[in-house]
Amino acid sequence: QVQLVESGGGLVQAGGSLRLSCAASGRTTSSSDMGWFRRQAPGKEREFVAAISWSGTITYYADSVKGRFTISRDNAKNTMILQMNTLKPEDTAVYYCGVKFAETDRTRSNNYNSWGQGTQVTVSS
């Protein structure tokens, strides 16, 4: 079992930046894809934001964040980072990190095996 803990959320003005971290413990994640999703309102599905291959060499982004967000990972430290720049009010959401053990579609939240508790990001206009 993997335990994931997100941190780094907060309140920021539009155009600002935040850096989210995801710390993993328990079962190793160094051979698994990981990703960031967000939920913009209670009851809504988690929306894909970004994902990264186990090696860190391949990254994937939702069109809505491409060019503004950067995903990275450090397997030696069991951490994953989401650097968010030029934030917009529509980026306001609870952000979750997840890990996926099988070779399945990395943009679908149902394919992820473990999740963190989430961290709130609020962007004011």
Image: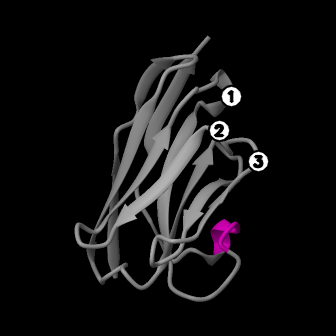
**Direction from residue 3 to residue 14 in the image, left or right:** right
The magenta-colored residue range is: 106-110
Specify the principal SS of the magenta part.
loop
User: In the depicted view, which residue is nearer to us: 69 or 88?
Assistant: 69
* Pointers 1 and 2 in contact (C-beta within 8 Å): yes
Residue 17, x across and y down, in percent: 46, 28
**First in residue order: circle 3 vs circle 2:** 2
What residue would you read off at disc 1?
90
Q: Nearer the viewer, mark 3 or mark 2?
A: 3
Distance (Cα) linking label 1 and label 3: 13 Å
Residue 35, x across and y down, in percent: 53, 63
What residue would you read off at disc 2?
40
**Direction from residue 31 to residue 50 in the image, left or right:** right
Marking on residue 63: 3
Q: Could you tell me the amino acid type at mark 3?
A: Asp
Residue 33, x across and y down, in percent: 51, 76
